[in-house]
Structure formats: C-alpha cells, structure tokens
Image (spheres, helix red, strand yellow):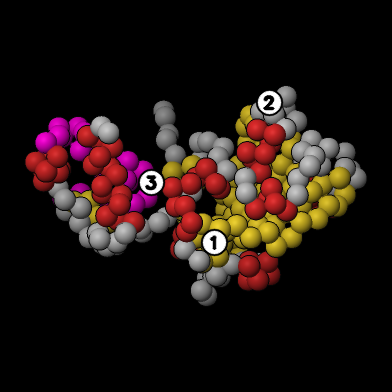
C-alpha cells in the first residue's frame, strides 16, 4: 500500500469508527509527515481526499476538522449506482423495495421521458437505509421495452449492474437537476425526516450509448445526510 493510501485509510478508519469524532481537529500535516515518514505533498493529498469525500473540512489558520463520519456523497460528474457509491459501507447499507409496478407513460411523466405516450414503464420505489436510518427514497421509472426482465430481487441489488452485465447495454450520460423541495407524502411515509420540512431531490434522465432514454429517476435525500462533490474547470 502506498504512503498516500495508508494515511488516507488510517484517517478514514479513525473517522468512521469515531475514534476521531465530529469537530475534532485532524493531526497537522507536520505531525502526519513525522508519523508516516512521508512528504508534505503525500500527506496533503490524503487530507484533500478526505475533504473531497465530505469527511473533513479545512478552516484557514486553524486546521482540518472532522465532519460527519458517514456523509452520503453524491458525485455530480459521473453516473454511479447507489451500490457503487456505498460499497465500502458493507452491511451498514440496505435497500427496501416498497413499490414495484408497471404503468403506461401518461400525464406529467411524459415531460420527463422521451417515449411515445402509452409506452410501458416500470416504476420502482426503493428506500435506502444507512446505519438503520431511512435517508434516501429513489423513485425509478424505466422504459420496459429497453430494460426488460426487471424484478424485485434485481431492484434490491443493483439495477445498473443488471443493465450493464446481464443486458449488455452501455449507459452513456445523464441530464441532472438538484433542488430543495417541500417534503411530499411519500417522503413522510418512507424517510426518517426528524422534523425536516424539505428534502433534496436529484432528478436524472439517463440515456444509453445509442441516445435512447431508458430511465427517469427522482432520488429524494434527507437534508442532514446529503453531500455532493464535483470538479469544476475553467
């Protein structure tokens, strides 16, 4: 294991096991350089990785401090499944399918899916639990002709893995919006809101390599666990 990975992994383990609790200052760059016999650049890279993933925050003139031990990181720049994002959390993550149905494309849903009216749509509602707490409600709509064979068992695992590995389809790109909206009846029924009046809604229209849209999804997040990151270039 490289020095960078060793430092990052050790600090991450201390944060996720709460040996370093929220608000605690991380060891300084100099302290880490001495402890690991590493260069300043190596230490800084490990700390920056913690910051990018939402585990730590640097305060100018004071140091770097621990944030939440398990933020829900949302990468703006890529298309990843829930299971890919949270694979490192293991048994702490669980998916519950609360609705699995098929319906024709009609009404307001036509604004979000590029397909003929009446096209058969598979709708799936999934509750994501992290650490036992219901923090995400995913409402997925898949074009049934493009994504055949979906069932509840697949929905409890990774639908994207099924699409890419079983159906051998290539997912290309997504159009995405993020907004804060008042909580809905679905949110109140399926999320642990703890009095929160709003949720963060991430909407995705996702397309295959050939340009056909196969999915429209609303991912509804509780405010206390949502975190997103991106790399911006000029």
Quarter of the image for residue 38 reads top left
Task: Report the residue that reaches farthest toward the right.
Answer: 118
Query: Mark 1 or 3, which is nearer the eye?
Result: 1
**How far across and how far down the image is residue 193, in percent?**
54, 70
Residue at 48% x, 48% y is: 86
Dot 1 surroundings within 10 Å: few (below 14), some, or many (20 or more)? Answer: some
Residue at 68% x, 54% y is: 139
Q: Which residue is mark 1?
A: 129
Dot 2 surroundings within 10 Å: few (below 14), some, or many (20 or more)? Answer: few
Are the residues tagged 1 and 2 within 8 Å (C-beta)?
Answer: no
Residue at 88% x, 49% y is: 104
Give the mark, 1 or 2, whose residue is nearer the N terminus. 1
- Work out whether 76 lies above or below 125: above
**How far across and how far down the image is residue 145, in percent?**
83, 37
Q: Secondary structure at mark 3?
A: loop
Q: Secondary structure at mark 1?
A: strand
Q: CA distance from mark 3 to mark 2?
A: 29 Å
Quarter of the picture containing the N terminus is top left
Q: Which residues are magenta?
A: 37-61
Give the mark, 1 or 3, whose residue is nearer the N terminus. 3
Give the mark, 3 or 2, whose residue is nearer the N terminus. 3
Residue at 63% x, 67% y is: 190
Q: Which residue is mark 3?
A: 53
Q: Secondary structure at mark 2?
A: loop
Q: Which residue is mark 2?
A: 209
Query: Mark 1 or 2, which is nearer the eye?
Result: 1
**How far across and how far down the image is residue 91, in percent?**
48, 56
């Amino acid at each position: 294991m490289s020095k960078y990975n060793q430092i990052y992994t050790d600090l991450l383990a201390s944060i996720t096991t709460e040996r370093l609790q929220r608000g605690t200052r991380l060891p300084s760059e100099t302290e880490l350089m001495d402890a690991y016999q590493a260069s300043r650049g190596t230490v800084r890279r490990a700390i920056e990785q913690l910051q990018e993933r939402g585990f730590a925050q640097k305060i100018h003139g004071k140091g770097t401090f621990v944030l939440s031990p398990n933020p829900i990181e949302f990468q703006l720049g890529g298309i990843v499944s829930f299971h890919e994002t949270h694979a490192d959390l293991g048994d702490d993550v669980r998916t519950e399918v609360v609705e699995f149905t098929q319906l024709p494309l009609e009404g307001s849903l036509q604004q979000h899916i590029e397909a003929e009216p009446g096209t058969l749509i598979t709708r799936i509602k999934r509750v994501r639990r992290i650490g036992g707490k219901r923090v995400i409600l995913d409402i997925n709509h898949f074009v049934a002709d493009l994504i055949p064979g979906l069932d509840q068992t697949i929905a409890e695992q990774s639908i994207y893995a099924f699409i890419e590995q079983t159906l051998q389809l290539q997912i290309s790109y997504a159009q995405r919006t993020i907004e804060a909206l008042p909580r809905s009846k679905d949110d109140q029924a399926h999320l642990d809101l703890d009095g929160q009046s709003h949720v963060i809604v991430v909407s995705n229209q996702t397309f295959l390599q050939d340009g056909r849209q196969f999915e429209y999804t609303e991912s509804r997040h509780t405010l206390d666990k949502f975190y997103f990151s991106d790399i911006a270039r000029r």
